[in-house]
Image (cartoon, helix red, strand yellow):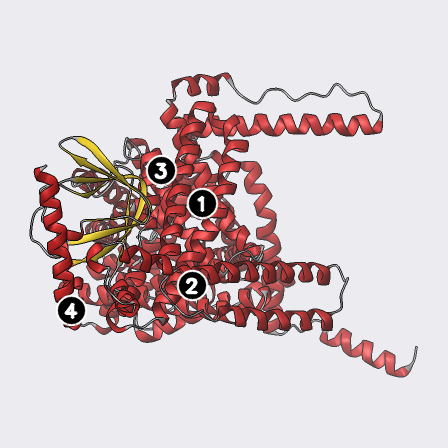
Amino acid sequence: MLPVESTVLSSMQTTSLVVSPLVSGVIGIAVLLTGVSLLVPLARRLSLPFTVLIAILGLGVGFLAVFADNKSTGLFLNAIREMNVSSEAFLNIFLPPLLFAGGLTVDVRRMMDDFSPILVLAIIAVFLCTAAVGLSLWMATGTSLLVCMILGSLVATTDTAAVLGIFRDIGAPGRLTTIVEGESLFNDAAAIALFVVLLNILKTAAEVSVGAIFVTLIYGLIGGVLWGYVVARIYCWVIGEFRMGIVAEITLSVSLAYLTFVSSQLMGISGIIAVVVAAMTFASVGRTKLSPGAWETLSVTWRQLDFWSTSLLFVLAAMKAPTILNMAASESSGQIALGVATVFGAALLARAAVLWGILPMLTLAGLSQAISNNYKIVLCWGSLRGAITVALALAVSEDAGVAKEFKEFVFIIAMGYVLATLFISAPTLRPLMKMLSLDKLTPQERLVRDRVMALSRTRVSEALRDVSGRLGFRTTLQHRPAISSESEQGQQKMSHADLAQAGLVVAANREAEMSLEYLQQGKVSRRIAERLRADASAVLDGARVMGSSGGAKGYLRAAIKLQRPTLSFRLALQLYKRLGWTGPLSQEIALRYELLIVKTLLLGELKDFAHDRLAPLIGPVALVEVEQAIQSRQEATHSAMTALDVQYTDFTKVMQDRFMERLAVSFEEVEYRNQFELNLISEPVFEDLAETHRQKKQALERRPPLNLGLELEEMLTKVPMFAGLTKDQLNRLARKLTAEFFTPGAKVIRAGDAGDRMFFIASGELEIWVGGKAVNKLERGSFVGEMALLTNQPRSADVIALGYVQVLVLMKRDFDSFLASNPSIKAQIELQAAERLAANLRAATH
């Protein structure tokens, strides 16, 4: 061996036993992550919540680190002893990922269906729990009332990880899961805001009124909501504006979580609620702005960050419990047990009071759907505490402004209560839900499940026969029928309306998936994809409504509402009518027209999906109702497109051509990307093609000039009193028109009503009824109600829509302003109207 090598090895041997704090921390974290990873399959095998085993691991490691002999312990325990993670690090490092990951998975629209009970459980229950625990603990232990209140606010936070894990394992109802998810997110925000206020009062010994506390809480909560929304929208805009790739987009989402939390803390608003709102906004708005395939990768990344944060936060906090217990010699075991039992009982009673006392009032007031007693029992018993409670307790234990005896009291009781919920409530929650039959599917869900299994097994059998035939094998392998007798009995009890409702829910979910598929395939822009996804969510909500107002009726009611012009469209139309500004209106028409084009494609594919996939699931009778609902949406969409074609003929023709050009460019881009990923073209070639496509897209984004269609001018000239107007005058009058939409059977005009407008039929048909009989039918291009512009006579007939009808409306006040600005033609029009009125009177007397 060379002398130099010998010297180096000797030096390494001498220094190998000296481990720096940084290396110790790395060793400790690595071993802990290994341990918690091994707990995942163990928790599944033992049918225990994962957080229960994490708590056991943390306590076990903590006790070994405290009570084991220093000489006999290895490198790992020495590293654990040297790890000193502060409460500030706990809150600022681990809390944002926990909150952001939770907010990403929330179905906002479904949560809004139960917004009232979620709000009650999240806010009112926090104050009630704080008061109940604080007063009970004060009376039981004699500790300072303010300290007991702080402890009450601290344990008011909930931990849904264990509960939702059990829900997923046994297939709990979706509504129950939504309530628990929504409650947890906003519950934590309210509880932590109250905790911060009470802790500051304790540290400063200030006298603060209840009103001041309330104002502080409201400021923090509302400020957090607004700030979280604004920051998330900015990040979503950046991601949509600059196509930066999956890795950068995921990095921005991590930046969003931490930046929102820290900046909120600096501004004195709720960082918890800001992060939650930012996550929910990012999930609902940013999903369509991400690169194709990025959402799935982002979701996996955040599940990983959530797993690390939950595991390390809980383990590291639990490891500190033995140390504090060892130092808390002044507290007797009996006093600790009494405190934990008091908190457990008071929190349980407070939650029961909310569930059985306050929520029924919301139902009676019509603010919430009823929640069954079985749901309430699970919500009451399943209120577990976890990582956030532990982190806040640790923050109190390390706060220099809090007296030592109060620190130990808060941490010990809080930690004991967390362990009590994990070791008592969590293991018994699964048997409780099975006893209450909450692990069983509804008849609709069971039917869909069994039919899907039957279809899948039939296809598997066909595939196996094909493969065995190609290989020359003789196989008798057959799949048993997947439809259970229980499911068949359930189907017999279900009405056709129930089956149709189940089919419409499946179709609406498929529609939402298709909107994202269209985006990934390059068929639509991000903005159109967002609208398609929002529309799918709206019809899904309508179909889900229980009772006679749901199903097909709710589905179509939501769909028809979507056909009406948006507020931004109406504002742009007014700017065009009043000031002649074409920019905003051309933008809105382009967006609306492209949306209608894409929706026409989507509904056609959705109808094929219903015919091919839903027929075996819901049966032929219910399928007819589903297909009729989709057909009605197709007719309404076609009617809306036709109306725009009439009103803006040249513009929509150009938009049709540009849509096809943009579609071709998008298809080419996807094709070139696939060739690049298969290494068929080099990176320089791909970048050159991408730049060419970018320039083409920019050119296609320029809007064509907005001109009213010739067909609209022809419609105006058919009105006798407008016959003498020049082309320019007709164009100015046409600007006064406003689009309206009518559903089948709707009354456009009622006999006896005062007339204040006339109608031009842009698409569809109207029928005139006099004396209970249909006397005439008006088709596209016709008009009705023109005499109302010059006379104050009441309407003489009913006019009813046959099918979906788009009309263009000329209001009397708009017509009067047109005449005021064009006095030269006023006399001419009045003369024409007088002649028309005289002719009508002569016809009526003969």
Residue at (8%, 54%) from the top-left corner? 791
Is any atom of residue 333 visible in this view? Answer: no
Where residue 531 sits: x, y (%)? 41, 55
* Side of 245 where 273 appears, left or right: left
Quarter of the picture containing the N terminus is: bottom right
Q: In this view, does 8 lie above or below 554?
A: below
Q: Distance between the residues labelled 4 and 2?
A: 64 Å
Where residue 286 sits: x, y (%)? 46, 61
Question: Earlier along the polypeptide chain: callout 2 or callout 1?
Answer: 1
Which class describes the residues within 10 Å of circle 4: few (<14), some (14-19), or many (20+)?
A: few
Residue 749: quadrant of the picture: top left
Q: Where does label 3 land, which residue?
A: 544
Which class describes the residues within 10 Å of circle 2: few (<14), some (14-19), or many (20+)?
A: many
Where residue 378 sits: x, y (%)? 35, 36
Q: What residue type is labelled 3?
A: Arg
The local secondary structure at tag 3 comes to helix
Question: Earlier along the polypeptide chain: callout 4 or callout 1?
Answer: 1
The local secondary structure at tag 2 comes to helix
* Side of 104 where 360 appears, left or right: left
Q: Where does label 4 land, which residue?
A: 208
Q: Which amino acid does label 4 sit on?
A: Val
Question: Of residues 142 and 439, which is closer to you in this image?
Answer: 439
Q: Distance between the residues labelled 2 and 1?
A: 57 Å
Question: Earlier along the polypeptide chain: callout 2 or callout 3?
Answer: 3
Q: Where does label 1 land, which residue?
A: 162
Residue 230: quadrant of the picture: bottom left
